[in-house]
Image (tube, rainbow, N blue to C red):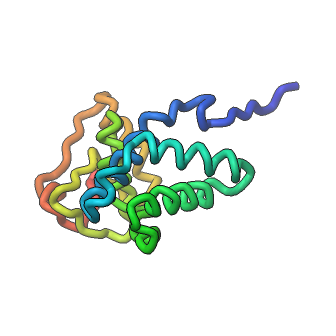
Amino acid sequence: MLSAVVFDADETLLDLRPAVTGGLVAVLDEMRRRTPAAAEVSLADLECDWDAVFGELASAPVREIRRTALARSLARAGLDGHLDELVGDNLAFDVVAAQRAGLRAVWLNRRGESLPPEVLPDAAVCSLAELPAVLVGLSGEADFSIPSGYRSGETSCVDV
């Protein structure tokens, strides 16, 4: 009797390329903002760094692969010392990159942090328990709007 079916999510059930590309574009934009030397770095360079590191560290944890690939890309522009400022759990990268890739972004704001004025997720939740209601709202199956206070950067979560 069949009791479970397990699928690999990455590149099997989900096409992550748009999100990965959006993230790399956001990193490249930030590199160029930080130093003129990054003008010589291309999106293709960052993609090559990811591919090379993934080939070398395929069995390593994803976090290690991401950090190593990002370190390699930052070194191209002399930004080696900025790795910790640019790896994961960064609201601007997580939300903006997803939106640039044509995806909707829901911010998990467990600590009630303020939003910078230039970042506007499609929704925010304080816990993952709130996510199903937000997804219903984002799918158009229910009335859903972001309160005006949320847009101005208040620290409360969206009431869903």
Q: Residue furthest right?
A: 1
**Which of the pair 67/14 is nearer the observer?**
67
Residue 102 at x, y = what percent? 32, 33
Residue at 43% in and 43% down: 132
Residue 2 at x, y = what percent? 83, 26
Residue 22 at x, y = what percent? 37, 42
Q: Residue furthest top?
A: 1
Task: Give the quarter of the image for residue 143.
Answer: top left
Q: Is residue 137 left or right of residue 149?
A: right
Task: Give the quarter of the image for residue 108.
Answer: bottom left
**Residue 49 in view of the camera:** yes
Residue at 27% in and 54% down: 159
**Which of the pair 5/72 is nearer the observer?**
72
Residue 144 at x, y = what percent? 23, 39
- How many marks the image carries: the answer is 0
State the quadrant of the N terminus: top right
Residue at 11% in and 53% down: 148
**Residue 92 in view of the camera:** no
Q: Is residue 92 left or right of residue 74?
A: left
Residue at 29% in and 69% down: 113
In the image, residue 121 sits, relative to residue 139, either above or below, namely below
